[in-house]
C-alpha cells in the first residue's frame, strides 16, 4: 500500500511529462525526460533531482519546488500537493485546513461545533430539502442535520464520506458512483499527503485499500483540493423507495471556531420516482 511521498510524486510527475512530450513531439524516441534533462530546465543539479526522488532530500527549498511548475506542466493543485509533501503546507496560502496541520481529536472538533450557536441552529433546523453537515480537517463527520442523515443513511459520526461511498449503502445510494469516486479520491489523496504522519490517516487508507476501485483511482496520482465547481451536483437514489434526488452542494471553511471546521450545505433541486 503506497503512502504519498515527495520523491515518489515527483517521479510520477516527471514520467507523466515525458509521456506528454513524446505524444506531442517535443520528445522523440529514444529520448526521455531524464533527471539530467529536467535539472537543466529547472536550473538545479541532476544530483538534486535524484536526491529528491529517492527520498534523500525530503524538503527542498520552495524556490526549487516553484521552478518545477513550468517544466512539468503542473496545475495549481499539483504544486500545492508538492508543497504538502515537502511539509510547506502553511506557506502558500491554501486556506483549506492550512491553519491546522495536526489532526485534532474528534471530540475537540465536536466541542468546537457545539460552541457555535448559529451552526447548531442550522443543524437542528427542520428543512426537508436542505442538507447541513460539519466535518473536521480529516474530513470526519462531526454532526449533520436530519435531512442529511435521511438521504445519506449510515454515514456515521466520525467516518469520512469516502468510507461511506465505498460501503454497501453508499454504492446503492449514489447514482454516478464511479464518477463520484473519481472526484473525491483525489481530494482524499491531498489530505493523506498532508497528514501522512498521523496513524489514523494511514489506518483509514489501509482499510480502504482493499477495494479495487479505490486502488485503481489512487494509483492514477490525481489530486484536487476541494470539489471542482463543474461537479457541484450529486444524484442520490433512495434504496427503499427508488426516489432519485439531485443535490446542489457547496463547501465552506469555518475559521472562527477553536479548530478549523468545514460546513457542507446541500439543496434538493429535483427529484423523480414514486
Image (tube, rainbow, N blue to C red):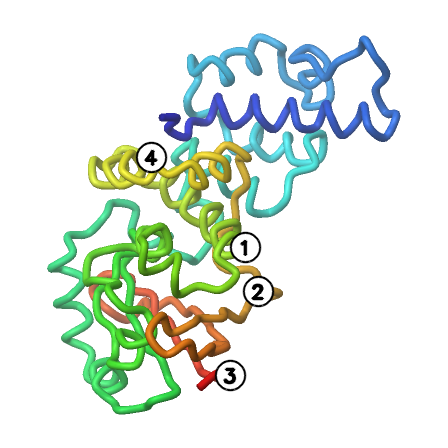
Residue labelled with disc 1: 179
Would residue 49 be found to the left or right of residue 112 on screen?
right
Crowding at dot 3, Cα within 10 Å, few <14 / some 14-19 / many 20+, comes out as few
Distance of label 4 from label 3 (alpha carbons): 34 Å
Distance of label 4 from label 2 (alpha carbons): 27 Å
Distance of label 2 from label 3 (alpha carbons): 20 Å
Distance of label 1 from label 3 (alpha carbons): 20 Å
The reply to whether dot 1 and dot 2 touch (C-beta < 8 Å) is: yes
Residue labelled with disc 4: 210
Counting residues from the N terminus, which is met first, the one under dot 1 or under dot 3? 1
Residue 132 visible at all: yes
Crowding at dot 1, Cα within 10 Å, few <14 / some 14-19 / many 20+, comes out as few
Residue labelled with disc 3: 272
Counting residues from the N terminus, which is met first, the one under dot 4 or under dot 3? 4
Quadrant of res 161: bottom left
Distance of label 4 from label 1 (alpha carbons): 19 Å
Counting residues from the N terminus, which is met first, the one under dot 2 or under dot 3? 2
Amino acid at each position: 500500500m503506497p503512502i504519498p511521498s515527495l520523491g515518489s510524486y515527483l517521479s510520477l510527475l516527471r514520467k507523466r511529462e515525458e509521456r506528454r512530450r513524446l505524444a506531442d513531439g517535443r520528445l522523440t524516441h529514444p529520448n526521455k525526460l531524464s533527471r539530467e534533462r529536467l535539472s537543466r530546465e529547472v536550473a538545479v543539479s541532476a544530483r538534486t533531482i535524484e536526491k529528491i526522488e529517492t527520498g534523500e532530500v525530503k524538503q527542498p527549498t520552495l524556490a526549487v519546488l516553484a521552478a518545477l511548475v513550468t517544466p512539468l506542466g503542473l496545475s495549481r493543485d499539483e504544486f500545492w500537493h508538492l508543497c504538502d509533501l515537502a511539509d510547506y503546507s502553511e506557506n502558500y496560502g491554501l486556506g483549506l485546513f492550512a491553519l491546522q496541520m495536526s489532526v485534532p481529536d474528534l471530540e475537540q472538533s465536536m466541542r468546537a461545533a457545539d460552541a457555535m450557536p448559529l451552526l447548531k441552529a442550522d443543524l437542528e433546523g427542520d428543512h426537508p430539502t436542505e442538507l447541513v453537515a460539519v466535518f473536521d480537517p480529516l474530513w470526519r463527520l462531526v454532526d449533520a442535520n436530519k435531512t442529511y442523515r435521511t438521504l445519506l443513511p449510515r454515514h456515521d459520526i466520525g467516518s469520512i464520506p469516502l468510507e461511506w461511498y465505498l460501503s454497501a449503502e453508499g454504492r446503492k445510494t449514489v447514482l454516478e458512483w464511479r464518477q463520484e469516486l473519481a472526484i473525491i479520491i483525489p481530494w482524499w489523496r491531498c489530505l493523506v499527503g498532508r497528514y501522512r504522519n498521523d496513524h489514523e490517516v494511514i489506518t483509514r487508507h489501509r482499510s480502504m485499500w482493499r477495494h479495487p476501485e479505490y486502488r485503481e483511482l489512487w494509483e492514477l496520482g490525481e489530486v484536487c483540493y476541494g470539489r471542482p465547481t463543474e461537479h457541484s451536483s450529486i444524484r442520490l437514489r433512495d434504496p427503499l423507495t427508488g426516489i432519485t434526488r439531485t443535490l446542489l452542494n457547496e463547501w465552506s471553511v469555518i475559521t472562527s471556531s477553536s479548530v478549523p471546521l468545514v460546513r457542507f450545505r446541500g439543496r434538493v433541486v429535483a427529484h423523480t420516482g414514486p
